[in-house]
Image (cartoon, grey):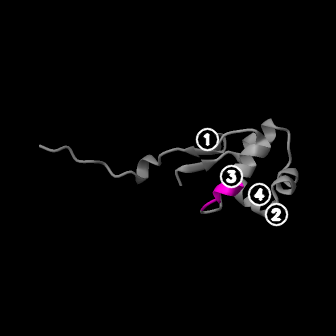
């Protein structure tokens, strides 16, 4: 998956535990854990906004796009 979740990095930078983040934004620790591991297919914008507000960061600090080179089809040059 080309989307990398860096939530664990931001939590470490803010010296905050997952449990505290979960309590502050009103979701379960399990959901924070799933977000940190990248095992979710999506995140609601309001949840992302609460995370950013709590951690004083931008969405780009949490989510990163790294293209999967093997998954990108090669384009053929036109003759």
Element marked by disc 4: helix
Give the label, 1 or 4, closer to the camera: 1
Mark 3 is surrounded, within 10 Å at the Cα level, by few (under 14), some (14 to 19) or many (20 or more) other residues, namely: some
Mark 2 is surrounded, within 10 Å at the Cα level, by few (under 14), some (14 to 19) or many (20 or more) other residues, namely: some
Q: For this view, does 3 lie left or right of residue 12?
A: left
Which of marks 2 and 3 precedes in the sequence? 2
Residue to which mark 3 is pinned: 48
- Looking at the image, which is closer to me, 37 or 70? 37
**How far apart, in angstroms, are the residues tagged by discs 4 and 3?**
11 Å
Element marked by disc 2: loop
Which of marks 3 and 4 precedes in the sequence? 4
**How far apart, in angstroms, are the residues tagged by discs 3 and 1?**
11 Å
| Residue 46 part of the magenta segment | yes
Which of marks 4 and 1 precedes in the sequence? 4
Give the label, 3 or 1, closer to the camera: 3
Which of marks 1 and 2 precedes in the sequence? 2
Residue 33 % position (x, y): 76, 58
Query: Which residue is outermost to the top?
Result: 13
Give the label, 3 or 2, closer to the camera: 3
Q: For this view, does 56 lie left or right of residue 59?
A: right
Residue to which mark 2 is pinned: 28
**How far apart, in angstroms, are the residues tagged by discs 3 and 2?**
14 Å
The part of the chain drawn in magenta is 42-48
**How far apart, in angstroms, are the residues tagged by discs 1 and 4?**
17 Å
Res 21 visible: yes
Element marked by disc 1: helix
Return the mark for residue 60: 1
Residue to which mark 4 is pinned: 32
Residue 23 % position (x, y): 87, 56
Q: Please tell me which residue is depicted at 43% across the width and 46% down the height of the picture.
A: 69
Q: Please tell me which residue is depicted at 82% across the width and 63% down the height of the picture.
A: 28
Q: Please tell me which residue is depicted at 42% across the width and 53% down the height of the picture.
A: 71
């Amino acid at each position: 998956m080309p989307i990398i979740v860096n939530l664990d990095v931001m939590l470490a930078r803010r010296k905050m535990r997952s449990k505290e983040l979960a309590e502050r934004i009103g979701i379960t620790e399990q959901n924070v854990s799933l977000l940190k591991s990248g095992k979710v297919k999506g995140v609601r914008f309001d949840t992302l906004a609460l995370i950013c507000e709590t951690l004083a960061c931008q969405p780009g600090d949490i989510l990163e796009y790294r293209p999967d080179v093997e998954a990108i089809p090669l384009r053929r040059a036109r003759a």
